[in-house]
Image: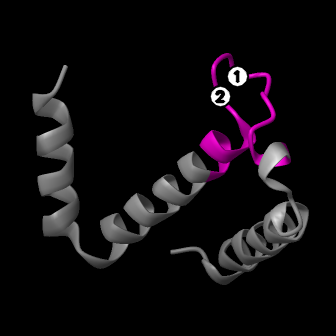
Amino acid sequence: MSDPLPVLDDLVAESDELDALVAGLSDAEWKVATPAEGWTVAHQVAHLAWTDRVALTAVTDPEAFAAHVAEASARP
């Protein structure tokens, strides 16, 4: 198996960079529209946080992840 540490280091660096970009945003800036129709900066950042949380669950708790997938699959 390949060494996962370089990838994890990259993920930490990306998270740090994103944190630096959004740390000082005003309430108005969080509401700015993005190129994704109907999505604000807040929506985009929340989506990234959700994705990270679910990915972590997939790695650390496969049973909980499988339950999450089953629940999501049951909803159209």
Quadrant holding the C terminus:
top left
The reply to whether callout 1 and callout 2 are in contact (CB within 8 Å) is yes
Name above or below for residue 55 compared with residue 2.
above
| Residue matched to label 1 | 36
Q: Which residue is mark 2?
A: 39
Residue type (three-letter) at the residue carrying disc 2: Trp
Q: Position of residue 56 (x, y in %)?
A: 42, 70
Give the residue at x 21% y 68%: 62
| Type of the residue with mark 1 | Ala
| Residue for point 59% across, 74% down | 2
Residue beneath the point at 85% across and 56% down: 26
Q: Secondary structure at mark 2?
A: loop
Q: Closer to the camera, 36 or 31?
A: 31
Rendered residue at 20%/46% (across/down): 69
* Gap in angstroms between the C-alphas marked 1 and 2: 6 Å
Q: Residues within 10 Å of mark 2 (few under 14, many from 20)?
A: few
The stretch of residues the image draws in magenta is 29-45
Residue 8's place in the image compared with 67, above or below, is below
> For the residue labelled by badge 1, is the local secondary structure a helix, a strand or a loop?
loop
Q: Position of residue 52 (x, y in %)?
A: 51, 62
Decide: is 40 above or below 20.
above
Looking at the image, residue 24 sits to the left or right of residue 7; the answer is: right
Foreground mark, 1 or 2, reads 2
List x then y, in percent, for residue 73: 17, 32
Q: Is residue 57 left or right of residue 4?
A: left
Does the magenta-highlighted stretch encompass residue 19?
no
Left or right: residue 48 versus residue 10 is left
Front position in the image: 21 or 54: 21
Quadrant for residue 49, please give it: bottom right
